[in-house]
Amino acid sequence: MAEEQNGPQEREAGAEPVGQRLWERDQELRSVDQAVDRLCREFAAGGLRIGELLVFSGSPGIGKTSMLEQVRRIAGARQDSTVLFARGNERQRREPFRVLRQLLLPVLSDLTEAEVEEVFGSWHNIVAPAVGLAPPSDEVERIDPQSVRDGLDFVITQLAPRRAPLVVIVDDLHAVDQESLTWLASFAVRARELPVLLVFAYRHEFEEEARALAQQIHERAARKHELLPLNPVSVAAIVHGEFAEADDAFCRQVWAVTAGGPYDTVALLREVRDQNLEPVEENSPRLRDLAAAARGEGRDYWLDKLGTTVLQFAWAAALLGTEIKEDLAGRICGQGPAQSGESVQALRRMRVLTSQPNGRLEFVHPLIATSIYQSIPPGVRTGMHGIAATAIENSGGSLLSSSRHLLETHPGEGDDVIVRKLRRAAAENLAIGAPEAARRCLERALNEPPDEEDQAEVLYELACASLLTDPEATANQLRRAIDMDNGLSPDLRVEAVFRLSEVIAHSGDLSAAAALCLDESERAPEGPGRIRLLVAHLLYTALQRDEEDGPGRAERVRRLVAEVDPDSEVAHPVRALYAWDLTLRGGSAADALRAAEDALVDGRLPRGLGWTNTTWNFELPALLGLCFAYNDELARAEKLFSSAILEFEIAGWSGAHRGFAYFLMGYARLRRGFLPEAEDFLRRGLRIADRMGTGLPLTWNLVGALIDTLLARGRDHEAWEIAVKYRFLPPYHQTALLLPDVATIYGKLLISRGDYGMAVEVLAETGTRLDKRGWRSTVHAPWAGYLAVAMAHLDLPSARKNGEDAVARAMVSGSPSAIGTALRLAASVWEGVHAVELLQEAVGWLGRSPASFEHAHALVDLGAALVQVGRSLEAAEHLYQGMELAKHCGADGLEVRARNVLASAGLQPSRPPAPPKDALNPQEWEVARLAVRPLPPQRIAEELGIPLGIVKQRLAAVHRKLGTGPEGLADALGMPTDGPGQAG
């Protein structure tokens, strides 16, 4: 057994606690035995998905800590198990990831270099700083907390089998820091998939923000044990174990004053012994006062028990919490090594502290630690926290550790040193994925307060700390920072306005974001900052659902491209915006692609336009990638989107950023016709969006693309179910532009359900709205083609006119996929020879595009049209090609349709098999040709210069593949047999 984390293990001789036996806990101990035995036994039998959760709950002092010590003993006795242990601490509840560090750092530190690579994979830069294995990366400003949790999931999934069976024990779960508790709650859901036994103990004293997590843990537990007070008989047995001569009345009074609590009972009996009190009925009235004293309810008790010097060391230890370093506690209370050693010996002797094998100290029981901490006078406590912060830093500790003590010091002194430390601590907390801890540091820094000229900057940092987790708070703080009289520097003011516009835009109010940027750009001096705000204004205007003057905005974008210095850093984002505008206007695809290329540097995103670069954010590179995707450069688009996923993972951005990257990649796969992969990416993105709330633009984008994918796969009913679940119907999102155009997708969905009248209404309105903006791209919104499909059931002449209009629009772009799709849709409202001609043209265009699903669709449509005009033999090849391509795309519905058309035409439902001889490889052909002459195997071997055994193997393969022996070989190969006498 490997005990990877340690708890109270050493005790002074003769200091074993009274009543160490666990009374009335037989059922709980059996449950522990069974859980540990099942874990080890099933793992030994090859089981892996054998995880279980066991919880103990109850009031303070009811015996939870003692129970967990027994769990550690039982698990530790198994030579094949690994035990990890950690304990929550009320004083360290605000120290992020503290319990996870205590739990995982020992076992992770023991990994070899090769094991570290395997266990962490690509998550090292994200997870290692959080668990204390490495300092925060200088390359990452902030990490999304969800990314840390995702990384921890990966690490524990890799670690568990390597150290299995694994027993993970956490005491005082109610006092665990929020970051650790959040992950533990999610891990409790997944633990059953791993060879892990989780054992948690807690009081029902969770803070408000932790109660939902506690409920989640409780509901997941397979074994739940609420520890109850001891009955009078058990308490009497404990009393008699300490005082054999105690009378019954005395025992009953002990039970009455302690309410059957094991901790209080044992503590009271120690006081009785220390007071040399006879355990008789006459002394029973004194027990209530002794019980109160034993609880250690005040400074006087501990001062009387320990003395001034030892109590000061105990205060310092209580301040530090768990994993107490003797020398550090000594520095906090002003004691040298010799005096500290004496204090430790006294505290061990008095059963207050115990030593761990790693040399660190820990309180014998959490209640003792709480009692001693609460006995520190408030003024002294505040001062000691300040001393502790300095001592931790001087001893080489991190600001992450010292900052929790700075938070406990009194504000109001304007100490600039404290402000600087808190700001640095906030930055470190952001870099490990703990924005709430960063927020606490910056709020405390503001209360100090900082120098007047720094207040707006600290407020700006506070806003950025909650950027990924609390957009509403971020917006309020940014507004305050922008509005302050002694405000931000000009550059930082632009940054703050840009961040505020980003938050407003991501909440869906693009109009307000655009107005904010325009207003600020009019105030800003000439330079990059002003252009940045102008680009943001034009971008947010373009991304609005409705726009008053689309052509006018397009002209402003064109003028800006002409005005900007082509060699400046702002030229690239301006060109990216221009490329997107050209794409949506439906003009020449070549012009749009040329503008997109100009936005790149040597075919790559420029540094200032990177996915995680905070200067421009991810919208512009996303639109640049979509420009490639819309204009048939799908390989280029996928390369960009793949780098987005990777960069967001490296940066630890697991929220909306990664969800949007999954949407982009899913959409590119949909355009390319890789439908199962598209569905997978879109569903992954939707899971992220679901965690973030409802009604977000990201959700709409993902749902729209997923519905489009399901329709392409022939799963119309499932597409409708998704639409109903997410209320995918008009008026859609009220303010944000959604990609691809969701109204067109909704029209396609209505067509799939046969609701042609409503589809016509939706698609016609879409066309009017987009034409007003000057957006005529048939890839972004192929409304005209689908309007023709819907209209054909109501007004065929109008339908054909709409189909022709769709083709004309697509021809302007010159994009093969756009033209081919428009021709296919136009053909659907015709019959006979004209339909065949349109589809032949469509197949020709789509064969030159990367849109494989559309190509398959056109091939099947062409085959069906040829069957209708009596050209079934000609139709067969198109149907076979379309069916095979549909299968490759994962378009099950289209594949079935092709088979049905083949069957109705009396054709084979699949392409006839190739002649058997085509199955032979070149080496087998060579042997077969000589065997037909006929040459015996030995002569063949000599002629080819290969071993006889190889010849026989190849001949056997030839006969097996052709299904014939030597006599039928020539016929099977379609070769003449040489006559006798010619064989030599």
Image: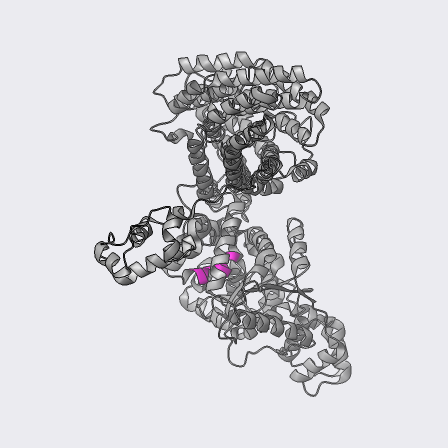
Horizontal side of residue 391 vs 230, given as left or right: left
Query: Is residue 421 among what the camera can see?
Result: no
Query: Is residue 673 among what the camera can see?
Result: yes
* Residue shown at the point (67%, 28%) measured from the top left: 751
Residue 768 in percent (x, y) is at 63, 16
Query: With respect to residue 802, does 470 lie above or below?
Result: below
Protein image colouring: one colour
* Residue shown at the point (72%, 69%) measured from the top left: 228
Residue 301 in percent (x, y) is at 62, 67
The one nearer the camera, 60 or 931, is: 931
The magenta stretch is 100-108
Query: With respect to residue 382, does 279 lie above or below?
Result: below
Residue 79 in percent (x, y) is at 49, 75
Is 124 part of what is drawn in magenta?
A: no
Residue 607 in percent (x, y) is at 38, 31
Horizontal side of residue 789 vs 578, given as left or right: right
The one nearer the camera, 764 or 8, is: 764
Q: Residue furthest bottom?
A: 245
The one nearer the camera, 766 or 732, is: 766
Q: Residue furthest front?
A: 980
Horizontal side of residue 593 vs 238, given as left or right: left
The one nearer the camera, 354 or 714, is: 714
The prevailing secondary structure element of the residues shown in magenta is helix
Write down the quadrant of residue 590 in the picture. top left
* Residue shown at the point (36%, 17%) measured from the top left: 565
Quadrant where the C terminus is found in the figure? bottom left
In this rendering, the count of numbered labels is: 0
